[in-house]
Image (cartoon, helix red, strand yellow):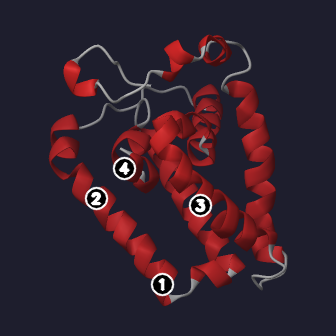
């Protein structure tokens, strides 16, 4: 999805030019709003099942979906599609929906980002969050504890929601999301 006009981008492929149907799809009414519903129809039950469902790796839908299917698939796919995932990220969707509802109930002006501070320190905050998640994963064996994996999903979603309620646009996604930072 990069520009292929400059010589330094000679090895990049613009998928939108290679596949005209992809451009039409991304500009259609199907993308991304209808995919948001499908994503949340998976994300919410998988997160809830982490608390009330089986807790062992062999029978937990949460553990299998999150650690065995989604995470490896995401890591293999992001070099190909880049940040396209961010358009259907359940954390961002939760933030967008809750912000829309809160602005409807309590109209207000959202705060702008402190871009100077975020440009200087945002990468460090992102790195610290990634390290915290990594340590939590290793020290408490998140890949084998469904309720802790669900808590991780809720905490990340809460960060996206809080940033969406306070700041304009997508502060969490741009500066604080560990997935987007790793992807970038």
Residue picked out by circle 3: 71
Looking at the image, is mark 3 or mark 4 nearer the viewer? 3
Q: Earlier in the sequence, mark 1 or mark 2?
A: 2
Q: Which mark is residue 125?
A: 2
Residue picked out by circle 1: 138
Q: From mark 3 to mark 4, how far is it between C-alphas?
A: 15 Å
> Badge 3: few (under 14), some or many (20 or more) residues near its Cα, within 10 Å?
few
Q: Earlier in the sequence, mark 2 or mark 3?
A: 3
Q: From mark 2 to mark 4, how far is it between C-alphas?
A: 10 Å
Residue picked out by circle 4: 181
Q: Earlier in the sequence, mark 4 or mark 1?
A: 1
Quarter of the image for residue 24 reads top right
Quarter of the image for residue 109 reads top left
Residue at horizontal 76 percent and vertical 27 percent from the top: 34
Q: Quadrant of the N terminus?
A: top left
Looking at the image, is mark 1 or mark 3 nearer the viewer? 3
Q: Quadrant of the C terminus?
A: top left
> Picture coordinates of residue 179 (x, y %)?
45, 53
Looking at the image, is mark 2 or mark 4 nearer the viewer? 4
């Amino acid at each position: 999805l990069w520009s292929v006009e400059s010589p330094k981008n000679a090895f990049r492929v613009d998928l939108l030019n290679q596949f005209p149907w992809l451009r039409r799809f991304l500009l259609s009414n199907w993308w991304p709003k209808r995919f948001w519903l499908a994503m949340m129809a998976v994300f919410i039950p998988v997160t809830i099942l982490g608390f009330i469902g089986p807790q062992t790796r062999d029978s937990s839908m949460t553990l299998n979906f999150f650690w065995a299917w989604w995470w490896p698939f995401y890591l293999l796919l992001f070099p190909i599609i880049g940040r396209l995932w961010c358009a259907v990220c359940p954390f961002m969707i939760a933030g967008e929906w809750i912000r829309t509802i809160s602005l409807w109930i309590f109209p207000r002006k959202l705060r702008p980002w402190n871009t100077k501070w975020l440009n200087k320190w945002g990468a460090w905050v992102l790195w610290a969050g990634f390290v915290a998640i990594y340590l939590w994963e290793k020290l408490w064996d998140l890949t084998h504890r469904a309720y802790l994996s669900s808590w991780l999903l809720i905490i990340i979603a809460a960060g996206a929601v809080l940033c969406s309620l306070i700041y304009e646009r997508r502060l969490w996604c741009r500066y604080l999301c560990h997935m987007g930072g790793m992807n970038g």
